[in-house]
Image: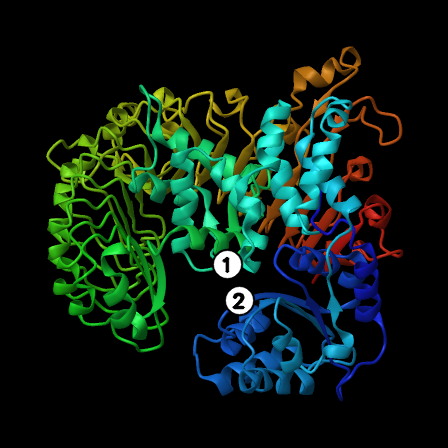
Amino acid sequence: MSEVFGREKEKDILITKLLSDGGKDQRGLLIIPILGMGGMGKTTLAQLVYNDSKVKAHFEKRVWVCVSDPFDEIKIAKSISGDGAPSSNELDYVLQCMSRSIEGKRFLLVLDDVWGHDSEKWERLRAPLIQSGAHGNRILVTTRKHEVVDMMRATSDMISLGELGEGYCLSIFNHMAFADKEVGESKAFEDISKKIVEKCKGLPLAAKALGSLMHNKRTRREWLGVLNSKIWDQEEVEQKVFQPLLLSYYDLDPSIKCCILYCASFPKDFEFEREYLINIWMAQDYFNSKGNKDKGEIGEAFFDNLVARSFFQDLVKDSVSGKIIGCKMHDIVHDSVQSLTKNECLIIDAEGVGNEIEVLGEKVRHLTLRLRLDEPLPPSKAYYNCKNLRTLKIICSSILTTIDSNFILQLKCLRTLHLSNNGISEVPKEIGELIYLRHIDLSRNGGLKILPDSICELYNLYTLRLFGCLSLEKLPDNMGKLISLKQLYVYGCAKLEYLPKGIRRLKKLKTIDVCAVVCVNDEDRVALQLGDLRVLNLQGRLHIILKGNVKDENELEKAQLWHMKQLFHLGINCEVVQYNQKARSTVEFLNVLRPHENLESLYISYHSGATYPNWMMSLHNLRIISLFEWSGCLPPLGRLPYLEKLSISRMHKVQRVGGEFWGLWTKMKRHLDHHHHLHFFPKLKKLAVGYMSALEEWEVGMERWNKEDSEMSIMPCLSSLNISRCPLLKTLPDFLCKTPLQELFIFECQTLSKRCECGSGEEWPKISHIPNIKILS
């Protein structure tokens, strides 16, 4: 149930204000603040209004910016500019780019969670917003501080969110506490429920959190224990906001408490990736594994537990599986958790290092250091008291070329080191002396070419993140000494031609996101070869880039991919591999790279064969398929029972999509009368077809199929269709009129675009039922 439940009146008022004609400034710019304390549902209310269909149709440009503190006019201006945002941080130039991006457009700008009330910064941003854009521009602001409303001179249009009525709070509480339970069960605790909800003080977040807490409590004794908890006796204003969250915190297992407390070391509005968060929890040794239970599985359970208890918000889900893969922490949750860390987690700017660390030095365990433009690292002596530091994160807006070796040597107890996106081109060899390091993040440092050999001395290292290091040319040859390494991330390291052969000695290694392997039978080579994969126990995702000259398919069989039961995604890139020193088809060696039947996601690129791999149609558990740059025909994918997402791109020789694509073979055609209920692509939800320069026809290819009364179904679950850059395509298949399509996007398909014009186009009857259609020529 949404936190905005009970705010219908405010929602209607907001939409009316946004869609009304006229405004307060010379170009019709109207500023509408939503004021309320934490947990009032300000952001959720703004999101509902922002995504309202009438609002979407009314504004030509909509931009959402999470502001927080401090108020950064450059960040806001760049967000408004979108893809046209400059790399420069020169204010006047950034504001000029912003003005051009909105010139002549009616826009809606949401400034979410504004804390800072620096009037000079606001006026610098406000002036070009007034001067640019069309009549009827709107700014929606969410804030907890009335000073922000005063700064924006928008008091008369402010919407102040008060407390929710107890009836609404009780509904939210009951929805969370008694979900999936017997109807009568809520009656047994009705009296206690009302008393607990009284203590929520009208905060929907509190009602939601407490409802989640009570969901697994079965006895009146447990319920009364919560009701009579001493936590309610605290009188401080902040604690009145934190109380329900703290109750949920105290109900956690000790290990999970450590995980949520650790999140306070990240800045507010930090976007957590599920896998990343679990890895850094593991680096701090928060998972007490009993028996042989995998620590990664424990981390997954911890993450899901915290999501279920409403510690995270803005959940990002995988478009196909629905699995939560990203999240943020609510500001109120962040504040309440920060209050519990007892100064163990510290987020400071460089200028405050000396004073704060001098006072808190030995207490600080997890430090986040923020550097401004061209600001150097504080001298190493500033960290002399940080002998117990376990985590260091450096967040830079400047170029931090290297890290001083003396600085590194102050951090002998460090377990987690985050230096991503800082412009680092050199890592000091002294890093090898930090023997307790378990997690290193050097990703997105474009100038980093090599790693010091000393990094191979970190025998406790679990995770090494190097993705996006565009200049990285090689990894140390002695990588085999990293006996504890579990995850290696090198995606986007364009110059990394191969991985060192020593990796095959890493028995605990479970993840290599991109694996560049050499396809030659040469045991003396230092490069990792395809046959070396058979000794690794890889899980999750694996993307193989085949390199070299294949003389014999038996070399490839040594990989034994069919034994990797724990892989759910496999990618194979054949762009730079050759067969028998000739540019022959790649199908011969794709056939021997058969994965395990458990595989759920498959990506194959640069396949030069006229046919598809012979194992492809036997992978009945496939849910996601992406085919890129094939020279041959389309595989008969229509009979795969669980396929949900399909992307086909750059198949330049394909001229027609017909019955073969559905999986309709000649033998089946002769016996159609005996198949009354045929289903093709029965679970497909998302289909993308792009850069098909020769594609002219797309049809069913079945004489018996009739769009009016056929007993056969084609793509009965299709919700999204994206067709881009197919210049010769003229028509869409008739079956589309029977699909539950919600989104259709056609981009740079000149002929098809004209034929799909609303009302007059020949293809319009096939797509007129689709609520969201976007056609760009």
Quick one: quadrant of the C terminus?
bottom right
How far apart, in angstroms, are the residues tagged by discs 1 and 2? 8 Å
Q: Do the residues under discs 1 and 2 have CB atoms within 8 angstroms?
A: yes
Residue 269's disc number = 1
Q: Amino acid at mark 1?
A: Asp
Task: Tell me if residue 138 comes above or below residue 590 in the rendering.
Answer: below
Any part of residue 156 in sight: yes
Q: As rendered, which of 413 and 356 lies closer to the eye?
A: 356
Dividing the picture into quadrants, the one containing residue 478 is top left
Q: Is residue 509 left or right of residue 738?
A: left
Tell me where residue 191 appears, x and y as whole percent. 74, 32
| Image height of 367 relative to 459, above or below | below
Residue 302 placement, left or right of 309: left
At label 2, counting other C-alpha atoms closer than 10 Å, the crowd grade (few under 14, some 14-19, many 20 or more) is some
| Residue 68: numbered disc | 2
Given the image, on which type of amino acid does mark 2 rest?
Ser
Of the pair 92 and 67, the residue shown nearer to us: 67
**Secondary structure type for disc 1:** loop
Query: Residue 482's spot in the image, x, y percent?
Result: 17, 39
Q: Secondary structure at mark 2?
A: strand
Residue 738, quarter of picture: top right
Question: Residue drawn 69% across and 52% down?
Answer: 745
Say left or right for 340 vs 310. Answer: left
Q: Residue at x 75, y 86 (%)?
A: 25
